[in-house]
């Protein structure tokens, strides 16, 4: 497949799975637009990725995905700057040991892992449709299996733990992909979710007790090169072009597992998220 005329937007490419995914897409010849919160880190990553791949078609857009005002600015810039988007990869993700709120009043894990991809994708939908065939990829996790969908407390105001918040946000990623694929029927825009594997990255770093657990878990983890394979597969393989509304692991379609994965919950999440994001 010729990727030289393709534009790939990816969030969270300054580290871990996102950085390797960006590298893979640059190696495949595409133009990559990284959305990053830390300008200095993004510039260092840019230099590194260009040196590694020899592909200079790499742009940086800076913004904090925990803030919906930044997400709106990012979407506006993308729409003004790029005549088409072939692939949007919602990859950035966080987990926090303690519950914190953003200055806009959202629980931070919920804001970064769910509301930001929800809003960014929705604001870019017209451009994605105009660019069809195009693809939306949501990086979820196997941890969705431990997530809970509670329509009246999506942000864990009661009984917060890092695990409840993170796992539920990854469940929301799949519910979002399901509803999105339904709404995008016959538009030529696909929406899928994936589990990258258990990957040694920076996620959860510097989070007290979690950092210790992480060091233990990391012994069993794969590296980011392996962890990026499913994202890259969904982004550029011919095989994935027409598949939508599915969940992938190790580059293969598998069934996500949760009693909360229902059409009704997907619809409720969409409605609640639209209200919260002011759509
Ligand atoms: N690692 C695993 O085992 C695993 C397993 C299943 C799913 N996942 C998923 O994979 C995705 C990537 O995670 P990772 O493991 O590669 O973690 P990572 O190394 O910590 O990378 C996360 C990326 O997201 C960016 N990010 C975080 N908060 C942001 C914000 N507010 N605004 C903009 N960018 C922000 C980070 O930027 P900075 O560089 O500035 O921090 C970084 O580039 C996540 O969605 C995660 O849930 C990971």
Image (cartoon, rainbow, N blue to C red):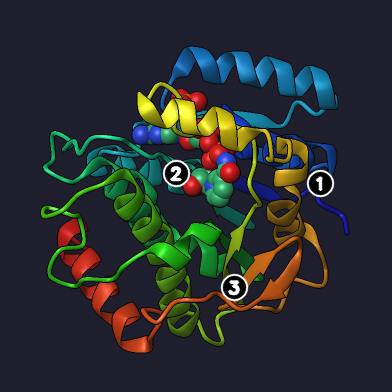
Q: Quadrant of the N terminus?
A: bottom right
The residue wearing badge 3 is 190
Residue 123, relative to residue 44: is it above or below? below
- Mark 3: which secondary structure? strand
- Mark 3 or mark 1: name the one nearer the start of the chain: 1
Residue 261, relative to residue 71: is it above or below? below
Q: Residue furthest right?
A: 1
Residue 101, relative to residue 259: is it above or below? above
Q: Position of residue 8 (x, y in %)?
A: 64, 47
Q: Position of residue 202 (x, y in %)?
A: 53, 28
Instruction: Say how many tags the image has.
Output: 3
> Residue at coordinates 26% horizontally, 41% vertically from top-left?
108
The residue wearing badge 1 is 4
Q: Position of residue 258 (x, y in %)?
A: 44, 76
Image quarter for residue 260? bottom left
Q: Determine whether label 1 and label 2 are within 8 Å by CB.
A: no
Residue 245, relative to residue 210: is it above or below? below
Q: Residues within 10 Å of mark 2 (few under 14, many from 20)?
A: few
Whether residue 129 is visible here, answered yes or no, is yes
């Amino acid at each position: 497949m010729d990727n030289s005329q393709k534009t790939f937007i990816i969030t969270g490419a300054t580290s871990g799975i996102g950085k390797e995914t960006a590298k893979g897409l640059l190696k495949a010849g595409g133009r990559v637009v990284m959305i990053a919160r830390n300008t200095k880190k993004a510039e260092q990553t840019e230099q590194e990725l260009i040196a590694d791949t020899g592909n200079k078609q790499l742009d940086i857009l800076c913004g904090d995905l925990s803030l919906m005002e930044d997400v709106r600015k990012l979407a506006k810039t993308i729409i003004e700057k790029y005549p088409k988007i072939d692939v949007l990869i919602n990859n950035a993700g966080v987990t926090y040991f303690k519950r914190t709120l953003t200055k806009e009043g959202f629980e931070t894990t919920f804001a970064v892992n769910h509301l930001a991809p929800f809003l960014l994708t929705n604001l870019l939908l017209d451009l994605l449709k105009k660019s069809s065939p195009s693809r939306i990829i949501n990086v979820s996790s196997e941890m969705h299996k431990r997530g809970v969908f509670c329509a009246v407390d999506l942000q864990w105001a009661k009984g917060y733990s890092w695990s409840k918040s993170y796992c539920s946000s990854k469940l929301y990623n799949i519910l979002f992909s399901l509803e999105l694929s339904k709404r995008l029927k016959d538009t030529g825009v696909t929406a899928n979710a994936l589990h990258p594997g258990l990957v040694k990255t920076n996620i959860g770093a510097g989070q007290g007790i979690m950092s210790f657990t992480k060091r233990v878990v990391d012994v069993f983890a794969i590296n980011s090169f392996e962890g990026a394979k499913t994202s890259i597969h969904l982004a550029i393989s011919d095989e994935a072009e027409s598949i939508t509304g599915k969940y992938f692991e190790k580059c293969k379609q598998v069934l996500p597992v949760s009693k909360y994965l229902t059409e009704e919950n997907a619809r409720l999440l969409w409605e609640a998220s639209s209200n919260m994001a002011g759509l």
